[in-house]
Amino acid sequence: MRLALVGLPGSGKSSVGRVLARKLGVSFTDSDTVIEQRIGEPIRSYFEREGEGRFRDLEQQVIGELCASRLGVLATGGGAVLREVNRRVLHEDCTVLYLRSSPEELHRRLRHDTQRPLLQVKDPRARLQQLYRERDPLYRETAHFVVETGRPTVQTLVGMILMQLELAGIVDANRVPPPSSRRARTLELGPYTSGMSSISVTPLSGIETIDIALGERSYPIRIGSGLLRAPESFAGVPRSPLAVIVSNTTVAPLYAQLLRDALRGKHAQVELITLPDGESHKDWTTLNLIFDALLAGGADRKTILYALGGGVVGDMTGFAAASYMRGVPFVQVPTTLLAQVDSSVGGKTGINHPRGKNMIGAFHQPVCVVVDLETLSTLPMRELRAGLAEVIKYGPIADASFLGWVEANLDALLARDVATLRHAVRRSCEIKAAVVGQDEREAGLRAILNFGHTFGHAIEAGLGYGEWLHGEAVGCGMAMAAETSARLGLLPEGDAERLIRLIDRAGLPVKGPDLGADRYLELMRLDKKAEAGEIKFVLLDAIGHAVLRSVPDATLRQVLASRCT
Ligand SMILES: NC(=O)c1ccc[n+]([C@@H]2O[C@H](COP(=O)([O-])OP(=O)(O)OC[C@H]3O[C@@H](n4cnc5c(N)ncnc54)[C@H](O)[C@@H]3O)[C@@H](O)[C@H]2O)c1
């Protein structure tokens, strides 16, 4: 196996490379270290004395030799991609990961650096910006994967990279240390009690901000209490003359006026579209109500839509924004727990089709997400429990510690303790941000967020949308996926039981409706994760680590027989 890391100075190539190599049980080589051994002095002095050209010649030679050898993980110097021959050799001989960081992040990390020759200038920030402009396209050209490094810890990043490589079939899951030893380490997204700042949480006068790093489509998630009353919650949203709030018959009477007042200084005109409430209305007919109102109200390409409501309103408003006049900006203002921890983040938008859930849709990222925890005070208990399903989901797929925290704090969550809810929302968003930042379009890693959803979608479609809440179906789907993982020998039975117990304690169903195994299989094949008729399930091979697997029909029938009433 040959993995190579490229990226600007300070992007973490050496530290990430070292941990990655250790996890994979392969050697780690830093091309700069090899060069220094060869020249017998620091690169900086050689570079100053001999000039960049001589140094690059040497670097090219070393990279060529290393790529031809039995490499494990290779960290390259920041300028290695400047030569076309290096780009080609790396791309052809290795799986190349580009560790992308913004120049601002790099400046923060490197402001005291005295070793890197290119940064020993008067204005290192400007130098980094220039390097980024010049080299980002070259790193992208060389790389097979772009890894956003802005937020997570090294451990997190390595966990994400490993999952990405496993899902792409580049790293054999069996070569990664076994689940028991991985459980405590690989996918820990930083300490969950005090060190939440591991993924760039910036407290800003009571507002906490988590950034979704997607290049020019990056945006903040702002979390706090009373944000709907604070115009600054919407900082950065363009000042268009017309804004349109899209909500529904339940949420609009509760919160539309508050939002309108907060937006007054930003938009001369703020209109409201009120949709019928419910999953059964997440369809073409209701979507057309939005288009009709926008056209009748003279909305143009600068008009901004605000999605005020749960996941249904968010998904439909987002899809309307993606397609109205070929795309207008929109803001997510989620008011259910489920929408705050999941659906408002990540840019998936869409509507249901009678033949399948969310079958028609688009990726369209919001300008920002504003999470006002106070709105949860009016949420019906059943909806709160449904939202907890998605909160619970993040632990088993990515963070064993968080699962433990949810177990310990479930009662406070159910009692709507605001500080506890705040932590749950924040941590969930951090994990979702980390995953979406690596894989915006669900080419690989993002699929893990669908844990429990293949079974869940079949339940929703089989019963008719709206009969079970989405979160209830996901809760039950996670119980089914956990049992499937255990039956396949991937997950210890005790771990599956532990997760099922928590879902049950949250008041969510752990037994599915008896649709008949044939009907379940038919509906699951229709789900969009079925490729060429083969269904890929998100399963667990440890608490805190998800894998994608196809499952024999016989196993699915056993699970359905045991988990349906
Ligand atoms: N886009 C994504 O990535 C993504 C992810 C997960 C789920 N989803 C979608 O989200 C939808 C489910 O979202 P949901 O669970 O938020 O359901 P929902 O939008 O139907 O909201 C649930 C109910 O709560 C009401 N409500 C909302 N906020 C309220 C408040 N503050 N006080 C009182 N009542 C309130 C709503 O009117 C509705 O009746 C599904 O359609 C699902 O497919 C999308």
Image (cartoon, rainbow, N blue to C red):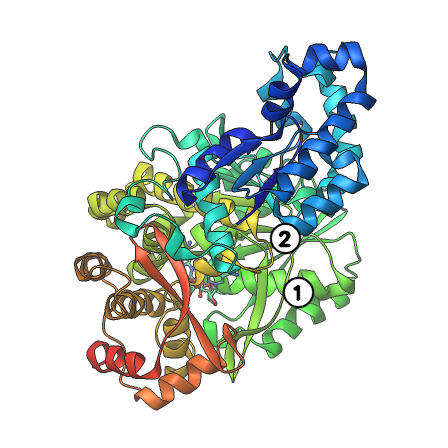
- Quadrant assignment, res 324: bottom right
Give the quarter of the figure containing the C terminus: bottom left
**Amino acid type for the residue under numbered disc 2:** Gln
In the picture of the structure, the residue carrying the numbered disc 1 is 320
Which residue does the image show at 80% across and 36% down from the upper left?
83
**Above/below status of 466 relative to 448:** below
Image spot of residue 555 (x, y percent): 29, 79
- Ligand 1 lies in which image quarter? bottom left
CA neighbours of label 2 inside 10 A, class few (<14), some (14 to 19), many (20+): many
Q: Disc 2 or 1, which lies upstream in sequence?
A: 1
Image spot of residue 411 (x, y percent): 20, 47
Count of marks placed on residues: 2
**Above/below status of 132 relative to 139:** above
**Above/below status of 103 relative to 210:** above
**Amino acid type for the residue under numbered disc 1:** Ala
Query: Contact, CB < 8 Å: mark 2 with mark 1?
Result: no
Which is in the foreground here, disc 2 or disc 1? 2
Q: Secondary structure at mark 2?
A: loop
Judging depth in this view, the residue of 323 and 485 nearest the camera is 485
In the picture of the structure, the residue carrying the numbered disc 2 is 365
